[in-house]
Image (cartoon, rainbow, N blue to C red):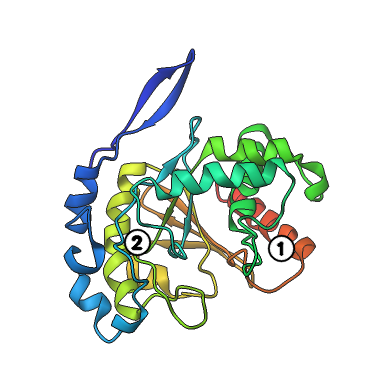
Amino acid sequence: MATQLTWALIAGNLVWQNMISETNLKEIYGTTTDLEQNCFSATSCWQGYENHKPGYIQEPYLPYIGPAYKGIVFSGINLNGGNDRIEAIDTLVDTAKTYLNDQKFRIFRQKGYGGSTFYYYVPLLSFMVNAVLNKNATFQSEDDISWEQIIEGFDYCAITNLIKCSTATPDGRSKPSNAMWQNCIPKFRIELEKIAPKVVFFFSKFLYPTMLEQQFPGFKRRVQTEKCNVSDYKSIKIVEIAHPMGRGTRKARFEEYLQAIEALKKTL
């Protein structure tokens, strides 16, 4: 499938322009208006799971593409609420930048919600990957990276999710049904081809440890450790790591992610 990204001249710089359209989303998911009712897989995905519907109309959403995209893609599982607009991730990124400007580690923190570290670690990792792979930079700790550089990381990456639907599970973590995993990842692979990545980070190391075996035929494992996997899939490098919201200290998480980037570099 031909890539849907093109180069555009913006403010005197050549940058990737996201050409994935609502039409593309409709081709992939079957709808742009109501995933729970009109997605190709809606009946299967919500069978026996209807009581976990969030209570608002969910739409498929476009991936976020940074203005200086370097082929670095980050994929979460699904959005924990908020995917009622096609620009949902773009809005989340814009909002996250305001928190990072205020040097907030937990993004979207508010009364009744302790906040998420996802939109802290994604741009941090993006900045580090670009610096390590393209500039041979080295890092010892988070103190080596400024808040401005973390925000800059959004410029180099794309962000999307494996699963488009959110759920309202009692644990508050929007846990997808088994059918959602099985039905949505093939759709995700089509979206991935359009984003044309060089490397994809999946935050699914412990949530779905057999995902590549089941969903990415022909992959080849290059590195396998307790904390990360690095694999080849077609022309893409896939890195599987723990979700930022998992247990562990901030220092340990940084070291774990840095080791994953170093393992990735060794496979290039």
Query: Label 1 vs label 2: CA separation?
Result: 26 Å
Q: Is residue 153 above or below residue 110?
A: above
- The C terminus - image quarter: top right
Marked residue nearer the N-terminal end (1 or 2): 2
At x 71% / y 54%, what residue is drawn? 105
Q: SS for tag 2?
A: loop
Pointer 1: residues within 10 angstroms few (<14), some, or many (20+)?
some
Q: Residue furthest bottom?
A: 48
Label number found at residue 253: 1
Q: Which residue is mark 2?
A: 164
Q: Could you tell me residue 175's position as x and y percent?
A: 44, 76
Q: SS for tag 1?
A: helix
Q: Name the quadrant containing residue 52.
A: bottom left
Of residue 121 and residue 225, the one placed in the foreground of this image is: 121
Q: Residue furthest front?
A: 111
**Amino acid marked by disc 1:** Arg
Of residue 51 and residue 260, the one placed in the foreground of this image is: 51
- The N terminus - image quarter: top left
From the viewer's perspective, is 224 left or right of 9? right
**Amino acid marked by disc 2:** Lys
Q: Name the quadrant containing residue 252.
A: bottom right
Task: Answer yes or no: is residue 40 visible.
Answer: no
- Total tally of numbered discs in the picture: 2
Q: Could you tell me residue 153's position as x and y percent?
A: 61, 39
